[in-house]
Image (cartoon, grey):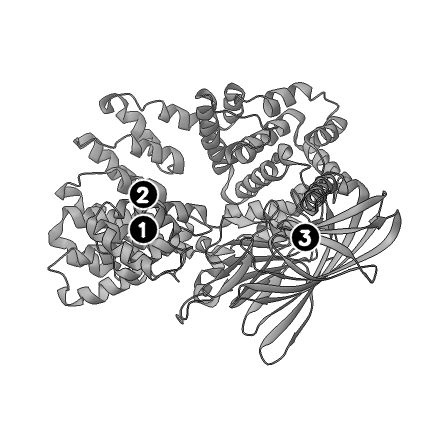
Amino acid sequence: MSKNILLFLLLAVSALTAQKTTSDQLAQFDFQKLQARLEIRPEQQEVLGSVHFTFAILEQADTLKIDGRKMEFSEVLLNGEKARFYTDDTGIYVLSTFAPSVSNELDLKYTAHPESAMYFINWQDKTPEAAREVWTQGQGKYTSNWLPSFDELREKLEFDITYIFPKSYQLIANGLLKSRSENDSLITWQYDMEKPMSSYLVGMAAAQFDSLTENAASGVPLKMYFRKPEAGKAEATYRYSKEIFDFFEKEIGVPFPWQNYKQLPVVNFLYGGMENTGTTIFAESLMTDSIGFNDQNYVNVNAHELAHQWFGDLVTEHSGKHHWLNEGFATYYALLAEKEIFGEDYYYWKLYQTAEQLKEASDSGKGQAVLRTGNNSLTYYQKGAWVLHMLREQVGDATFREGIKNYLNHYSFQNPTTEQFLTEMELVSGQDLEQFKKDWLEQSAFKASQALESLKRSEFIQQYLQVAGLREFPLEDKKELLREALDFPVNDYTGQEAVHQLQGENSQVAYDLYEKALESGNLYVRQAVAQTMENIPQTFKKQFEGLLDDDSYITKEISFFKLWSQFPESRAAYFKKLKEVEGFYNKNVRMLWLTLNLVTPDYEPGKNADYYQELAGYAQKWQPIEIQQNAFSYLYQISAFNDASLESVILGTGNPNSGFRNYCRQLLQELLKSQEYRERLEALAEGMDAKAVSYLQSKLSP
């Protein structure tokens, strides 16, 4: 037999062994603990680590796999002895005669250059204002990019990790900080977990954090972090954190299962938030001041990720088919928390909105059964929440709470199925839930008629539907009913609906109703006026100008633009009034102010260069992606990209954040339609890294 054929056969056997260990390993091995010491070198985008596993052998086996993507392993010890092993791009395979036994140890030394799951923000940029951070996002099965672990979420073990990181940064991770020591340039952070969890829930973040601390009613420490430049937003951002925590412990009936709870905002995060065990990481763009809080805030994400500490972290879905056990539960309990904070009308309004989305998907043939692998988020999150809302109505509040408590206690640190959850509900309710399962979990269509009957339990929803039902009627026929909807105290949602039905109307009747809406004093009804009134009559100018004073950055932005457009003689007054207003995290009001200033030739012409530099500066590659994207949109509108801004667009086409990446790719395609921009982009690409310009080159190729 030739050497080449022998090599081929050996590789084939190795591949079969890998497949076998992936499917059988849970039955063969029981991993109990991981102890690691990791040096994170952010400027090199590198992790140097040593990992110690303790485990039991349950069945005879010849191969053990640890997931570790594209890692270099330099030392492998099995029970203190050098072990035979081989590696591929997915991990390391340890070869031995594994016999059933209780106490076994595996030691690995490795080097990793994570391509995902651990992100190094701005470490190559020397701009003093740039936020330099490292954070992880292991959702699904990605932690193995930086830590040898297990992509299989059913493998749960205790993680005790010591991190070494450069000085002047706070490093926050799962568990209790047992010790902190430093030398000339590095700090060592030792974190300890007491209970097991899935590998995808391991998380850390390092940044120049400051923090607030509170204690829950049960005594659990709550630590809320923020970067120093965002300190003014900390109070509003975390305003209801303790209240949500206390509500969940009472509502769920099971104590918070971890040692402490921390929340960390990071720059350029991939999603809204991630429920790492005891350590939620979320997008810094959700941080807000008290004015911004009125329009968009962190409350829902805050509650959603905290709910996951029970539903997803303590009890984890068995597989993707049962993903709603994580996401549907977290969505539902977040909605309950918001109900506690914002009231019952808010709760039913959110249910109504998602019911409309689910009905639309169902009616168009795009409905999905909840019990299915590969669903979209609307199904797992929103339809999953509707399942629990309807189940609670069917079995009753007290029974529902008892069933949830039993489910969590019975399956703590396990991976149950939907059937096991329903069994717990059947036991406490005495009901056969088979038909419920077929209707709400196995049927792709959304049970819209049942949902509507549930919604109609709310008097507010009944009133809202009556007003919404007037949309197709002429204004003259419905004016009295719209006027009644705007009677004080006006409901947020019914009032907005009444105003939105005035869009496109220019009669005196419409202006009388607009005036009543403004006089209501309701922030959101007034915002609806700003959104819907297209032509502002001179007689209405003063009242419309009052919207600039509202505590809403959305209202300020919309009304500013409309007033600037329609009353050029008053532009100087509008510029003066909003000069110091930044707006949301993405600086929506400030960037509009700068752009309108640049296209108003008779206002402060001597400052145009400074204002342009400020606007273009927001597009620099080190800026948070939400700020970059907003700057790109304005620079595109006034056709004013400089080379630094164009470079940022090019780099954005490869950004890990899919929303920002797709935006940059679409923008790049639009810019390439201009011969001038095309030539400038080609010139810039010549001096950039080949990987960074790969998307651009694909569009330049004939």
* Percent position of residue 484, x then y: 33, 29
| Direction from residue 80 to residue 334 in the image, left or right | left
Judge depth for marks 3 and 2 and give the one in front: 3
Position of residue 459 measured from the top left corner of the image (x, y, whole percent): 48, 28
On the picture, is 367 further left or further right than 538? right
The numbered disc on residue 527 is 2
Q: Residue at x 69, y 44 (%)?
A: 11
Q: Earlier in the sequence, mark 3 or mark 1?
A: 3
Question: Rounded to the nearest whole Å, what is the CA distance between mark 3 and mark 2?
Answer: 60 Å
- Viewer-side residue, 654 vs 21: 21
Bin the neighbour count of mark 2 within 10 Å (Cα to Cα): few under 14, some 14-19, many 20 and up: many
**Label 3 neighbour load within 10 Å: few <14, some 14-19, many 20+:** some
* Residue to which mark 1 is pinned: 550
Residue 455's disc is none
Task: Give the amino acid type for the residue marked by disc 3 in the picture.
Answer: Thr
Residue 373 is at least partly visible in this image: yes
Instruction: Give the Cα distance between marks 3 and 1.
Output: 61 Å
Residue designated by label 3? 87
CB contact under 8 Å: marks 1 and 2: yes
Residue at image point 25% right, 37% down = 514
Q: Quadrant of residue 390?
A: top right
Closer to the camera, 352 or 115?
Answer: 115
Q: Is residue 291 visible?
A: no
